[in-house]
Image (cartoon, grey):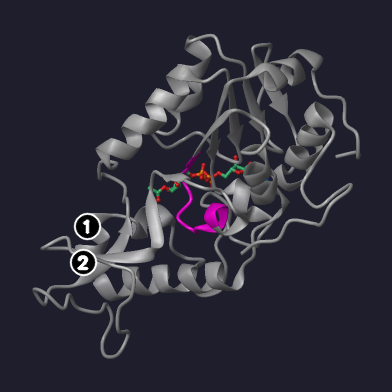
């Protein structure tokens, strides 16, 4: 995207006037950090598995080691990754609007590492494991021995503390996300295919309440009309440019020191 792309003036006005902005991010928001999205080809060892085959309770019951190792591979990718300009722009947006609710389907923790204060991690976090029986949650665990590791309280297997297909989302987190979608003045949908419910319904709720919704994605089907806007392009380029267009500033550009991931 060009350095000063032409964003719709009414969207820029709505952003500048907004008291509450809600943002939903998906895997495309972390793509420029080198984390593969879900519906693009997986690499190497994992190319023959689809996430739908691995991210289910049935898969874990059938082959816990396979599922644990897939998540361990993803955890390794995330540890080696850095937040990208999209994460940093969303962290900077917190300082530009009176209220920001950042909702993410990503389990990689990159929003927090970029400086976002309180991202709602709807699908959980790779940084945690929990016991499949007693539900004890762990931020650290021993990897010695046959994977997956075991719960130090009850001895059963640990699983990643993420939401799998067929499982329900934590009710409090979903409640906060729905409340933000219903109450926001502008909604940004960033790097998500919008195929997985209930997150996929959040932009629709915002639209139904009359909030402008801007979709940031290289692939936006059709020709959306206001109050739905297509901002076609990579999130790491579009979001900093959007902030620059609306407020004349963007993370890592212009006066002041560049923002860094923590
Ligand atoms: P997907 O893999 O379904 O979609 C990624 C989206 O990002 C696609 O629409 C791409 O066009 C877009 N994209 C790719 N690169 C981009 C970039 N640089 N900037 C902006 N957009 C880009 O990922 P999600 O929509 O996040 O759930 O998938 C939703 C859920 O399905 C995931 O949270 C996960 C998965 O199964 C669970 O594990 C429960």
The answer to whether the residue bearing label 2 lies less than 8 angstroms from the nearest atom of ligand 1 is no
Work out whether 176 lies above or below 258: above
Q: What element carries label 1?
A: helix
Q: What stretch is highlighted in magenta?
A: 103-112
Q: Residue at x 11, y 63 (%)?
A: 133
Query: Disc 2 to disc 1, how far (Cα)?
Result: 6 Å
Q: Mark 1 points at which residue?
A: 58
Name the spot of residue 198 as percent of width and height, x first.
Answer: 37, 32
Labelled pair 2, 1 in contact (Cβ < 8 Å):
yes
Q: Which residue is drawn at 70% across and 43% down?
A: 235
Q: Nearer the viewer, residue 19 or 108?
A: 19
Q: What element carries label 2?
A: helix
- Mark identifier at residue 62: 2
Q: Which of 150 and 111 is in front in this view?
A: 111
Q: Which residue is drawn at 60% across and 29% down?
A: 188
Quadrant that contains the N terminus: top right
Residue 71 in sight from this viewpoint = yes
In-image side of 9 versus 195 (left or right): right
In-image side of 96 versus 5 (left or right): left
Residue 198 in sight from this viewpoint = no
- Crowding near the residue tagged with mark 2, few <14, some 14–19, many ≥20 C-alpha atoms within 10 Å: few
Residue 111 falls within the magenta-colored stretch: yes
Assign ligand 1 to one image quadrant. Answer: top right
Q: Nearer the viewer, residue 60 or 102?
A: 102
Quadrant that contains the C terminus: bottom right
Q: Residue furthest left?
A: 154
Q: Residue at x 72, y 51 (%)?
A: 85
């Amino acid at each position: 995207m060009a350095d000063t792309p032409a964003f719709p003036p009414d969207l820029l006005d709505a952003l500048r006037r907004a008291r509450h902005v809600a943002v939903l991010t998906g895997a495309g928001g972390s793509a420029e950090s080198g984390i593969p999205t879900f519906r693009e080809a997986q690499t190497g060892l994992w190319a023959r598995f689809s996430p739908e085959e691995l991210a289910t309770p049935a898969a874990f019951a059938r082959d816990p080691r396979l599922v644990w190792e897939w998540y361990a591979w993803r955890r390794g990718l995330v540890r080696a990754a850095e937040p990208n300009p999209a994460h940093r722009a969303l962290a900077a947006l917190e300082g530009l609007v009176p209220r920001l609710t950042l909702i993410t389907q990503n389990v990689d923790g990159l929003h927090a590492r970029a400086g976002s204060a309180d991202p709602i991690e709807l699908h959980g976090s790779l940084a945690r494991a929990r016991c499949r029986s007693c539900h004890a949650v762990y931020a650290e665990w021993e990897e010695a021995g046959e994977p997956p590791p075991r719960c130090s309280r009850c001895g059963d297997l640990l699983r990643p503390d993420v939401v799998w297909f067929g499982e329900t989302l934590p009710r409090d987190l979903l409640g906060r996300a729905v409340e933000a979608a219903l109450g926001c003045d502008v909604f940004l949908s960033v790097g998500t295919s919008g195929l997985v419910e209930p997150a996929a319904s959040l932009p629709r709720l915002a639209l139904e309440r009359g909030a402008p919704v801007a979709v940031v994605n290289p692939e936006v089907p059709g020709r959306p009309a206001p109050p739905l806007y297509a901002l076609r392009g990579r999130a790491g380029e579009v979001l900093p440019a959007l902030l620059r267009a609306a407020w004349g500033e963007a993370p890592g550009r212009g006066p002041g020191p560049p923002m860094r991931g923590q």
